[in-house]
Amino acid sequence: MRRPLNVFAERLEEILEYNFSQFRTFKEPDLEKALQQSVRFCVDMASADKPARWLTLLGPCGVGKTLLAKFINRFYGKFIQDLPDDRNVPGEIWNRRGGFKPWINVINDMMNGDYSGIRDLKQDWFLVIDDIGVEYGKNRELATTKLFEILNARENLFTVITGNLTLEDIDSKLDARIASRLLRNGSSVVNIVTKDFNLR
């Protein structure tokens, strides 16, 4: 692992522990794997490893996908906040930051004729696209086309994707090209098969 770009070099383990300590796995193997992959994603991001990794968390409602994505996004916010003001930080990190984007909000913007955010979704150095698969009715074709377009442009950018579909559902119900993109460059796809947290 490369040395992180900033103060994370000394405090990385402490920050990771604080950031993810609230996530309960209930000793479920799928949740353990999702947590491990989320931590690994953060470590890679902090050290700016290339090529950038993708992490896709798939499973039914209430299993913690969005919660983990929000923890990763919080970690990213701390990472950006602690970046040193010097020339050792790659310009792409400074200029293409990113954040958490619920996919339904992106779809609603497009349905209202606002495509202004698509460019940032393609270029942000880090991005969470939360809850893909909410495409329905007349917006399905547009949303699926734009999702593929965004993912296709993000090959070397850190990306977290969550969805209620399985990889097989994405292949058959959305677009086989999207399913393929989720697996490229050694990216991780975690299928979480467990009970809704709220039903425990």
Image (cartoon, rainbow, N blue to C red):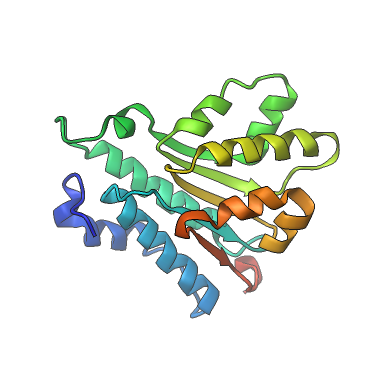
The residue drawn where x is 52% and y is 33% is 121
- Residue 30 percent across, percent down from the top left: 54, 74
Q: Nearer the viewer, residue 81 or 43?
A: 43
User: Where 159 falls versus 41 (above or below)?
Assistant: above
Which residue appears farthest toward the right when viewing the image?
Answer: 137
Disc tally is: 0
Q: Can residue 7 be seen in this view?
A: yes
Q: Nearer the viewer, residue 186 or 71?
A: 186
For residue 124, which quarter of the picture? Answer: top left
For residue 113, which quarter of the picture? Answer: top right
**Could you tell me which quadrant the C terminus lies in?**
bottom right
- Residue 168 percent across, percent down from the top left: 71, 63
Q: Can residue 23 be seen in this view?
A: no
The residue drawn where x is 69% and y is 26% is 110
Q: Nearer the viewer, residue 95 or 69?
A: 95
Q: Nearer the viewer, residue 171 or 143?
A: 171
The residue drawn where x is 23% and y is 62% is 13
- Residue 161 percent across, percent down from the top left: 55, 50
Judge left or right: residue 140 versus residue 5: right
The residue drawn where x is 46% and y is 73% is 32
- Residue 23 percent across, percent down from the top left: 44, 65
User: Where 157 falls versus 28 (above or below)?
Assistant: above
